Amino acid sequence: MSNAEVVENWAYGNEGFTRSLRTDGNSLYSYNLRIGITGPDSEKIVFDFSSTGGNFMSSTTSTHVGLARRHADTIHRGDSPIAEAMSK
């Protein structure tokens, strides 16, 4: 499975994984950092931990965030209080 397929699975509420990216259909994780969640109305929320989104983690995580942004209904900066609270 490719990283793009993992993100698509998350977008449709299905499980999927690679070595560094995984989803249970509800949350999306880059390594062990939650970079996406599914809200109460099935909206997809992404936490931007890329170099331009605040709180940069790694190049790989930035790539994962970039894939997830394509399916996001809402994007929060990685250094926002909500991202801090929800990324754990």
Image (cartoon, grey):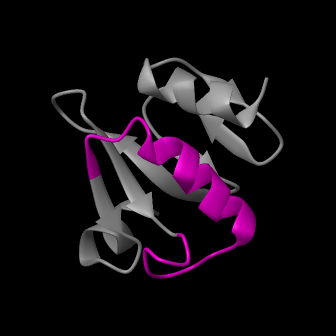
Is 25 a magenta residue?
no
Residue situated furthest left in the rendering: 41
Q: Residue 18 placed where, x, y %?
A: 79, 35
Residue 38: name its quadrant.
Answer: top left
Q: Residue 20 placed where, x, y %?
A: 77, 48
Residue for point 51% across, 55% down:
34
**Of 23 and 76, which appears nearest the observer?**
76
Residue for point 44% across, 39% down:
70
Q: How many marks?
A: 0
Is 53 a magenta residue?
yes
Residue for point 40% across, 60% down:
47
* Depicted 78 relative to depicted 22: above or below: below
Residue for point 29% across, 77% down:
80
Q: Residue 7 placed where, x, y %?
A: 56, 33
Q: Residue 66 placed where, x, y %?
A: 54, 52
Position of the N terminus by quadrant: top right
Question: Where does the magenta region start and end?
Answer: 50-74
Taking the image as drawn, is residue 24 in sight? no
Q: Is residue 20 left or right of residue 42?
A: right
* Depicted 19 relative to depicted 5: above or below: below
Taking the image as drawn, is residue 85 in sight? yes
**Of 69 and 81, which appears nearest the observer?**
69
